Each structure stands twice: as C-alpha cells, then as structure tokens.
Amino acid sequence: MAKGKHAKQNTTPEAGDDLRTLAEAIAFLGISKPTIYRLLERGDLKGLKVGNQWRFRNADLEAYLNRDSLAVATSVVSHDALDEELAFFSEALGEPVPVVTREIEDPREEKTILLTGKMIALAVTMRASDIHLEPIRQDGDTVALLRYRVDGVLHETRRMPFDIYKAVIQRVKIMTECQSVCSRRARRRSSRCSMATG
C-alpha cells in the first residue's frame, strides 16, 4: 500500500497537542518506517495527518508502548467461542472443563491461556512432533485450522474461529519470548528458569 493511502485515525489536532513527526515517532518507538506504516494500516497505532505529513500524539505513542498484547488480541474473541474450544480440548484430554475462578476484569485472557495450554497438552498426549495452526478459507470466511503431526503425518484436529487463532498466536509469542529471556538469563547466570504452559 502506498504511504499516502494509509487510513487516517484523526485529521484534526486539538489545541495543546504535543505532536511528533514520523521520524521522531520511529525513533521514540525504536521501529522501522515500514513497521510504523504497517501499524497505522492495521489500526494498532493512532496517528493523524497534518497536511500530507503524519503526526503522532505523545499519549498515543505511550499507549502503544504500554499495550498488553494478549489483552488486545483476546478483546475481540467471544466468550462462547472460547468456552466451546475449551470444552472440545478438555473432552479430548478426558479432563473437566476449567472454570475461570479468578476475579479479573475480562476472563477471555485467562481462557486463552488455558486453551493454549490444552492445545499443547493434547499434542503431547498424541505424541505429536509439530503443531500447525494456520488460517484457511472456508465458505467465504477465514478460520483457523489446527493440525498435529504424528508419525510424520498431519492430522486435522480442529477448525476454530479466526479470532481465536489471533489470540492463541499472541499467547504463543508471549510464551516464546519468555523462553528466550529465560534462556538468555540461564546462559548469563547459569540459573534455572521455568515457564507454565497454561
């Protein structure tokens, strides 16, 4: 997409706004120019056009840096869809359906963590070497196809709503970041670090 065609989030700066230029926002966030355009295009970062130039409010840049990526990803997932997937994987594992008991503002994040753990647990139970979760087209919609590789053969296990795909992928990214940090710490200090999967 051409740079001038990115969607504008707001076209009028308010009085007293402390605005940064595109170059200043890139330096502030520590990202590349293509990345900032992608964030604008997806609506992950708020910006506004002043003339033909992008400008960014400090508050919007701070909000982007302080976002909770899993909370953002789970905010669009329906409770019913998460409950249905948790029930499927719990049944496949021969376990009771978990009940989210913590008093939290939005239980979808906790349900996504539990679901991701159950997806991994089922892979271990099936002795799968790989987990494949990918978006596919089905009847004009995008859904998530989950397959496990067992003895060299991919077996379709489940088709889920695409919103769940995005939330689970975000959870896996967080888990791998944790493993990476733990691994670096272990190499530096020869200490132990563990990670829960659900």
Image: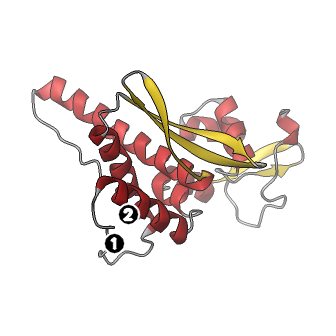
Residue at x 55% of width, y 48% of height: 165
Q: Are marks 1 and 2 in contact (CB under 8 Å)?
A: yes
**Residue 152 figure quarter:** top left
**Quick check: 96 left or right of 1?**
left
Q: Which of the marked residues, 1 or 2, is nearer the chain's N terminus?
A: 1
Task: Name the amino acid type tagged 1.
Answer: Val
Residue at x 32% of width, y 72% of height: 99
Q: Is residue 132 above or below residue 142?
A: above
Residue at x 78% of width, y 44% of height: 54
Residue at x 28% of width, y 39% of height: 124
Task: Name the amino acid type tagged 2.
Answer: Glu
Whole-percent x and y of residue 96? 29, 67
Q: Is residue 81 above or below residue 73?
A: below
Q: Nearer the viewer, residue 150 or 161?
A: 150
**Residue 46 figure quarter:** bottom right
Q: Nearer the viewer, residue 162 or 91?
A: 91
Marks 1/2: CA distance? 7 Å
State the SS at label 1. Answer: loop
Whole-percent x and y of residue 136? 66, 40
Q: Which residue is mark 1?
A: 100
Whole-percent x and y of residue 110? 37, 63
State the SS at label 2. Answer: helix
Q: Which residue is mark 2?
A: 110
Q: Nearer the viewer, residue 102 or 10?
A: 102
